[in-house]
Amino acid sequence: MEEILTTIPEAASAAVGLDISVNNVWLLLATFLVMFMQPGFAMVEAGFTRSKNTANILMKNLLDFSIGSLTYWLVGYSIMYGDSISGFIGNPASNFAFNVAEDSYGAGYSDFSDLMFQTVFAATAATIVSGAMAERTKFNAYLIFSLVITLLIYPVSGHWTWGGGWLSELGFIDFAGSTIVHSVGAWVGLAGAALLGPRLGKYVDGKAKAIPGHNLAYGALGVFILWFGWFGFNPGSELAATDGSTSAIARVALTTNLSAAAGAITAMLTAWGRYKRPTLSLSLNGALAGLVAITAGCASVSPFGAIIIGTVAGFVLVFSVEFIDQILKVDDPVGAISVHGVCGALGTLMVGLLAIDGGLFYGGGFKQLGIQLVGVVSIGTWALGTGFLLFAILKATNGLRVSKRIEEEGLDVYEHGEGVYN
């Protein structure tokens, strides 16, 4: 009998240890998948822009991840997840330089795994800005604002939500970051693109002129890489792979995939109807629009709800790209503002309609929809406002835009002293 009683706690302890190990491995695997999205972003941006700027594009994607990794470890994580100051910002001193004396597994996984997972999300927010401001931005200015985004802009609004701040207490739902990650990057990019001005030759006599990318094969490869990486982005946000989470990550993977597929098909059909051709570029961005839109509600909606979200996102994307390009006259070479900003906000709002628990269409009334609206508007205002302030300061001091000659001949040679195609 004594042997049996002794064995029970040992078995329980071993089971807990196994759960922690499985959760930890899953979280790190998801981290590596999300990091793999960086070359996806690089390929999309490079393919959708001109060959003379390819080295510049690749350098920006390399450096925003490198800078983001260091700054988020140093203080960004503390601002986002540190002891809350009035629900607005984490105390930077509470975990400066991730000062963990001894690794803890209180959340069911390693603290270091959590830092790594959160770091790749921060880098994603920064790299979205690159696409919206491509082909005419000074490289040194890009390095500065990439640092500020991962150091302050993203962590502050992230604290409001995932860090347990005021939006979290309100009940705002953004499971993996349609608004918290994607829209933040897009609204900062909108501010930058507006202050930067369009590329030379983009608008002739007030009318938008298409500037085709040099390699849509790169763009297509990038989208497939991003689609693949999103299975770390969304299912990984479950932060566990044991007990009930085993089924949850499978469900999230399903809703994520269905929304992406619906977005691609709908964007293709919409472009086919409006422009008389099923364009590859809009279809690719349609898939991304579906992925971005479902990211907020991937754990809250049904598979059918995910298809609805992807369908709406793919349809809206086509008209959003046209509106921003031709009406607002903001030059966004890769469609980042429409994909990540507009469709990110749209997907976050649709959680208030389609969430199985509390959504308007499931008898939950308007409460959740109202909370989602508050979150979208407040985070959007923060990102857009701080983005305008940041870029206005850079424009007045360092300068934002390269000279006319550099833009005409290409940033690769003048900014980096080398080209990709030699």
Image (tube, rainbow, N blue to C red):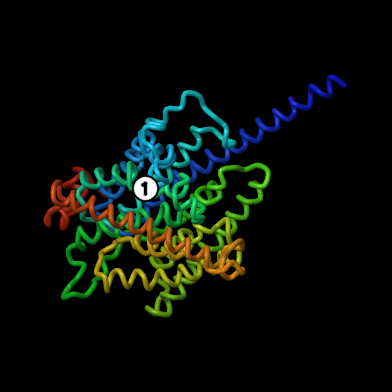
Q: Residues within 10 Å of mark 1 (few under 14, many from 20)?
A: many
Which residue matches tag 1? Answer: 154
In the drawing, does residue 243 fall left or right of residue 3? left
Q: Position of residue 21 (x, y in %)?
A: 61, 33
Q: Position of residue 345 (x, y in %)?
A: 42, 62
Residue at 26% across / 56% down in the picture? 133
Relative height, residue 76 to residue 197 (above, below): above
Q: Position of residue 360 (x, y in %)?
A: 56, 69
Residue at 38% across / 61% down in the picture? 377
Q: Is residue 220 visible?
A: yes
Q: Residue 200, located in which quarter of the rendered image?
A: bottom left
Q: Is residue 348 visible?
A: no
Q: Position of residue 69 (x, y in %)?
A: 37, 37
Q: Is disc 1 placed on a helix, strand or loop?
A: helix
**Figure quadrant of the N terminus:** top right
Q: Residue furthest top?
A: 2
Relative height, residue 379 to residue 64 (above, below): below
Q: Which one is in front, 45 or 160?
A: 160
Q: Residue furthest right?
A: 1
Q: Which one is in front, 132 or 375?
A: 375
Residue at 53% across / 40% down in the picture? 29
Residue at 24% across / 52% down in the picture? 53
Relative height, residue 122 to residue 292 (above, below): above
In the rendered structure, which amino acid carries the disc numbered 1?
A: Tyr
In the drawing, does residue 106 fall left or right of residue 331? right
Q: Residue 195, located in which quarter of the rendered image?
A: bottom left
